[in-house]
C-alpha cells in the first residue's frame, strides 16, 4: 500500500501545458474597457511584462519553463500525490481517492507556482515593484515570497474582511518584506470612491484588483500581478496536473474524476487542464472534470456567460467569462479566496462547452467535509480547499451506491493553518449558510444593469 | 451615571403554573389557585449581576414592583419615582413608565411577560429602548433577553440598538386554546455589539439599518412590472416600501403594484381577492417575534389561503443578519398543516444585496 507517490526533482515539468492549443475554436479575445475593441499587447504593456503578455495570448501547446524558475520550484516541487486510504476506508467506498498536496509550498498553497514565474519575468523586464491584490492572503503571501527572491518591492491590497480575519497571513507578507494594505484604501482613486459610497464595506477581490491595477498604471517602475483568472496564471499552474498525470502513471492509473475548488479558477485549471487536454484530443474522452464553488458566489453554476470587467471599477479589459456582475460584492464567508464575481475565461469556456462542469456548496457542508478529511487523512485544509474535499467525498459516496471503483483525483490546494477561526466558527455553530438568490435575479434579469 | 428605569410585574408568570395561560386580569384567581410569584426571583438574578456596576442608577417603583428586590440585591443607587397601593395593575405599570420617562432614563428594564411588554411599550413607544427579563407565561414578543443573566450583560455593557416586535396576544382566546396574536408595535431594544465574534461579522452586522437598506436595494432591483406584491409588517419590509417612495402600514399588510399602493392595511379577504384578481402575486414577509415566525403570528392576514393563491414559490422572506442571528430557527404555523409541510426543511432568506441565507424551518411548534 503506497500512500505517497513521489517524483524526483528532475521530473519537475520542463514545459507548461497550454490548453488553448487544443480548444476547437479560439478563445473570445479580451476587449478594451473603453473602446470595446480587442486589446493588443500594447494595451497591456503598462502593467505586464512582454513575456507574460506573450504567454497570455499564445496558442502554442507547450511553453518552456525557465531553468531559473525550475530551480526555485525545487524548494517544494514535485509536490506529493497521496492515496487517501484512510478516507476511502471511512467512507466505505470502492472508489480510489488521490489528492495532490500543494500545501507543501513555503506560502502554504499552489499560488507560488505562478508567483515565482511572474516575479521572475518582471525582474527580467527591469521592473522594480509589483502591486497586487489578495483575498484570503494566500496569493499575497505567495507573491511576497517570490518578489523577495528576485529583490523586487511588493505592495499588496488585501480585502479588508480578510485583513482583519487572517492577521497571520499579513504577518507572513511582512516577514517576506512586502507592504500589505487593507482594501478599499485611501491610497487609490478606486479605493476612495468605494469608501465614499460605503465606508463599512467588507471589501472584495474586485475592488482590490482595481486598486492594484491603478497603482501599477500610475507608477512607471511598477507592474501588476494577478494570482488567478488570467491565461498565463492558469498556464503556470499546469505543473500540478502534469505532475499528477506522471504520478498516477507510476501506479498505472488515470483519473475518472478530476476536482478542484474554483474562485478565479487557477488551482482548478492547474490540476485539470492537462486532463481536459486529453479529453479534448480524444485520448480520454470520459473524464468527469468538476469545479467546486461556494453557493454564496456561484459563478459557474449560476452566472451568465458574457463579457464583463475583471474588477469593480471597470479598469481591466472585458473578459468573456461566467460572471455574477462586476459590481457584486459576495458575502464575507470564510473561503475568502473564492469570493470573486467572475472566473478564468478558459475555465468558463470549458464549462460552457461541457468539457467541465461545476457544483456549488454551502459553508457548513464544506467544513463538515474538511473535518472528515482532517480526522482521516490528518491534514487541516483551507476553507477554499474544503470545497474540493466535499466534492471528492460526494463523488466517492456516489461510487459507494453504484459500486463503481472510479479513480477520483482532487487538488488539495492549501493548508488551513491560518483559518482556525473559521473552524472555531464551525464548531460554535456560527457559520452562516449564505447563498445567491439566483431565481429572483434570473426572473428580473432585464432590470439588472447591463454587464458590458 | 446611567439612569435605568426598572419595574417588576409582581404577578407575572403566576397564571402559568396553575394553568391559567396568562395572568392578565386573573392575578386573584392565580393566587387563589396557590400560584407563587416568581418574577421577583428572576429580577433578583439580573440585579445581582448588575450590583457591581457602579455607573448605574435605577429609577424604580415602590415595594414589590421594584424597590424591595433592589434592596435585597444589595443595590443602593436607586430612587423611587412611583408608588402604588394595594395589588399592582397594568395601569400602575403604565404610570410608572411615564414617571421613568420624566426622570430621563436611557433604558427601561422590566420583568414580566407579553402583557407587561405591551403595557411598557404603550407608553414608551420608540422614545427609549426597553428590555424584558423573561418571567411571563407567554413570551411571543421579541423584546425579552434570553434569560436574566443575559439581560444583565445587555444593560451593563455598551450596546447598540435594534428593532424588536411587541406582540399582543388575546388572553381570552388563548385560554380557549386559540392563539390570536397581533403585531402591537416595534420597540427599540439594546443589542450586543458582538465585537467578540469573528471579525468578519463586525463589518456585516455593525448596523442593522444598513442591512435593511441593502435588502431593500435588492428587492427593488428584482421587483417586476405587472406583479402584485403583498408586503407584510415590520421595519425590514418598511425599508423596501421606503425605497419605492411608498408610505406603508408599519404594523399591517399592504399590497403594492408597479411602485404604487393597491391596498392599504389589508385584511385576509382583501388579500385573497387581490391574489385572485392578479395573475401573478408575490408575498414579501419578514419573520416576526422572538421565535421568528414566517407565518402564523402577527401577520395572520397572510393566511394559508392567500399563500396558496400566490403559490409557495412566490413567497420572498427577508430578514437582517442581526435578526437571523437571534433566531436560529424559523417557524411556520399557517393553520394549514399541509401547507406547513410543503415548506420543507429549510428556506432561503434574503439578508443583503444579492445575498441570502439558507435557514432551517420548524413547523407548528
Image (tube, rainbow, N blue to C red):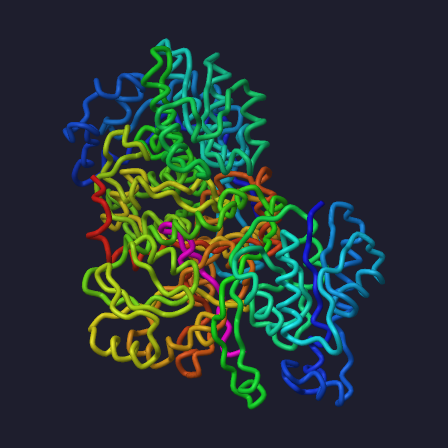
Q: Residue A117: which quarter of the image?
A: top left
Question: In terms of depth relative to the viewer, which is nearer, B215 or A120?
Answer: B215
Is residue A377 something that shows in the picture? no
Q: Is residue B316 left or right of residue B328?
A: left
The residue sitting at 42% across, 83% down in the picture is: B336
Question: In terms of depth relative to the viewer, which is nearer, B70 or B267?
Answer: B70
Q: Is residue B49 left or right of residue B326?
A: right
Q: Position of residue A340 (x, y in %)?
A: 37, 40
Q: Residue B134: which quarter of the image?
A: bottom right
Q: Position of residue A91 (x, y in %)?
A: 54, 60
The residue sitting at 24% across, 49% down in the picture is: A448
- Look at the image and give the residue range highlighted in magenta: B350-365
Magenta span: chief secondary structure: strand
Q: How many marks?
A: 0
Where is A310 relative to B206, above or below? above
Q: Position of residue A400 (x, y in %)?
A: 47, 64
Is residue A64 something that shows in the picture? yes
Residue A139 on the magenta span: no
Where is A76 relative to A95, above or below? above
Residue B360 on the magenta span: yes
Amino acid at each position: 500500500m503506497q500512500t505517497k507517490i513521489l517524483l524526483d526533482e528532475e521530473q519537475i515539468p520542463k514545459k507548461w501545458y497550454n490548453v488553448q492549443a487544443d480548444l476547437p475554436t479560439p478563445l473570445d479575445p479580451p476587449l478594451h474597457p473603453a473602446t470595446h475593441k480587442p486589446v493588443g499587447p500594447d494595451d497591456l504593456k503598462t502593467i505586464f511584462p512582454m513575456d507574460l503578455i506573450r504567454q497570455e495570448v499564445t496558442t502554442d501547446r507547450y511553453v518552456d519553463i525557465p531553468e531559473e524558475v525550475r530551480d526555485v520550484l525545487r524548494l517544494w516541487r514535485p509536490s506529493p500525490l497521496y492515496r487517501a486510504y484512510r478516507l476511502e476506508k471511512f467512507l466505505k467506498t470502492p472508489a480510489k481517492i488521490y489528492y495532490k498536496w500543494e500545501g507543501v509550498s513555503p506560502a502554504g498553497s499552489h499560488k507560488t507556482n505562478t508567483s515565482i514565474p511572474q516575479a521572475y519575468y518582471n525582474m527580467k523586464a527591469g521592473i522594480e515593484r509589483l502591486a497586487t491584490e489578495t483575498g484570503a492572503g494566500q496569493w499575497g503571501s505567495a507573491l511576497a515570497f517570490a518578489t523577495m527572491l528576485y529583490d523586487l518591492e511588493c505592495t499588496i491590497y488585501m480585502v479588508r474582511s480578510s485583513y482583519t480575519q487572517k492577521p497571520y497571513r499579513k504577518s507572513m507578507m511582512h516577514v517576506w518584506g512586502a507592504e500589505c494594505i487593507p482594501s478599499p484604501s485611501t491610497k487609490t482613486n478606486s479605493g476612495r470612491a468605494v469608501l465614499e459610497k460605503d465606508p463599512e464595506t467588507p471589501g472584495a477581490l474586485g475592488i482590490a484588483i482595481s486598486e492594484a491595477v491603478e497603482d501599477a498604471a500610475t507608477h512607471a517602475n511598477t507592474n501588476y500581478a494577478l494570482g488567478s483568472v488570467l491565461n498565463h496564471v492558469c498556464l503556470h499552474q499546469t505543473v500540478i496536473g502534469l505532475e499528477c498525470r506522471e504520478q498516477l502513471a507510476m501506479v498505472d492509473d488515470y483519473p475518472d474524476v478530476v476536482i478542484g475548488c474554483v474562485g478565479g479558477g487557477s488551482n482548478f485549471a492547474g490540476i485539470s487542464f492537462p486532463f481536459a487536454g486529453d479529453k479534448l484530443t480524444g485520448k480520454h474522452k470520459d473524464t468527469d472534470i468538476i469545479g467546486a464553488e461556494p453557493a454564496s458566489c456561484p459563478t459557474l453554476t449560476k452566472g451568465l456567460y458574457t463579457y464583463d470587467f475583471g474588477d469593480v471599477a471597470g479598469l481591466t479589459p472585458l473578459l468573456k467569462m461566467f460572471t455574477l456582475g462586476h459590481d457584486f460584492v459576495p458575502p464575507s464567508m470564510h473561503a475568502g479566496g473564492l469570493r470573486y464575481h467572475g472566473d478564468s475565461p478558459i475555465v468558463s469556456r470549458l464549462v460552457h462547452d461541457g468539457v467541465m462542469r461545476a457544483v456549488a456548496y454551502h459553508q457548513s457542508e464544506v467544513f463538515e467535509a474538511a473535518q472528515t478529511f482532517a480526522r482521516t487523512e490528518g491534514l487541516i485544509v483551507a476553507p477554499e480547499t474544503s470545497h474540493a474535499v466535499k466534492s471528492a467525498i460526494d463523488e466517492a459516496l456516489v461510487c459507494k451506491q453504484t459500486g463503481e471503483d472510479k479513480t477520483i483525483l482532487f487538488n488539495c490546494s492549501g493548508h488551513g493553518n491560518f483559518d482556525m477561526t473559521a473552524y472555531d466558527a464551525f464548531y460554535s455553530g456560527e457559520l452562516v449558510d449564505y447563498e445567491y438568490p439566483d431565481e429572483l435575479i434570473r426572473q428580473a434579469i432585464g432590470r439588472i444593469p447591463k454587464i458590458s | 451615571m446611567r439612569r435605568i428605569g426598572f419595574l417588576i410585574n409582581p404577578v407575572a408568570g403566576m397564571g402559568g403554573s396553575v394553568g391559567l395561560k396568562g395572568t392578565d386580569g386573573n392575578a386573584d384567581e392565580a393566587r387563589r389557585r396557590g400560584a407563587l410569584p416568581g418574577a421577583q426571583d428572576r429580577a433578583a438574578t439580573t440585579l445581582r449581576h448588575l450590583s457591581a456596576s457602579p455607573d448605574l442608577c435605577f429609577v424604580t417603583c415602590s415595594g414589590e414592583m421594584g424597590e424591595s428586590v433592589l434592596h435585597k440585591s444589595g443595590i443602593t443607587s436607586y430612587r423611587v419615582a412611583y408608588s402604588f397601593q394595594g395589588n399592582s395593575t397594568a395601569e400602575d405599570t403604565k404610570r410608572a413608565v411615564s414617571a421613568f420617562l420624566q426622570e430621563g432614563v436611557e433604558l427601561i428594564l422590566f420583568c414580566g411577560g407579553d402583557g407587561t411588554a405591551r403595557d411598557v411599550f404603550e407608553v414608551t413607544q420608540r422614545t427609549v429602548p426597553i428590555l424584558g427579563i423573561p418571567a411571563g407565561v407567554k413570551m411571543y414578543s421579541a423584546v425579552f433577553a434570553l434569560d436574566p443573566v443575559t439581560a444583565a450583560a445587555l444593560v451593563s455593557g455598551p450596546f447598540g440598538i435594534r428593532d424588536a416586535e411587541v406582540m399582543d396576544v388575546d388572553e381570552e382566546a388563548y385560554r380557549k386554546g386559540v392563539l390570536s396574536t397581533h403585531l402591537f408595535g416595534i420597540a427599540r431594544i439594546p443589542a450586543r455589539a458582538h465585537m467578540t465574534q469573528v471579525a468578519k461579522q463586525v463589518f456585516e452586522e455593525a448596523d442593522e439599518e444598513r442591512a435593511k437598506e441593502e435588502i431593500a436595494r435588492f428587492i427593488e432591483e428584482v421587483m417586476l412590472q405587472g406583479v402584485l406584491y403583498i408586503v407584510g409588517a415590520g421595519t425590514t419590509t418598511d425599508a423596501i416600501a421606503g425605497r419605492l417612495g411608498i408610505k406603508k402600514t408599519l404594523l399591517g399588510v399592504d399590497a403594492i403594484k408597479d411602485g404604487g399602493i393597491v391596498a392599504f392595511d389589508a385584511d385576509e379577504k382583501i388579500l385573497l381577492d387581490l391574489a385572485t384578481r392578479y395573475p401573478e402575486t408575490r408575498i414579501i414577509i419578514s419573520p416576526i417575534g422572538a421565535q421568528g415566525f414566517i407565518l402564523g403570528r402577527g401577520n395572520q392576514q397572510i393566511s394559508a389561503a392567500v399563500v396558496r393563491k400566490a403559490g409557495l414559490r412566490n413567497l420572498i422572506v427577508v430578514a437582517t443578519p442581526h435578526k437571523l442571528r437571534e433566531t436560529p430557527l424559523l417557524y411556520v404555523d399557517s393553520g394549514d398543516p399541509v401547507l406547513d409541510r410543503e415548506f420543507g426543511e429549510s428556506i432561503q432568506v434574503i439578508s443583503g444585496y444579492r445575498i441570502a441565507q439558507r435557514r432551517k424551518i420548524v413547523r407548528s411548534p
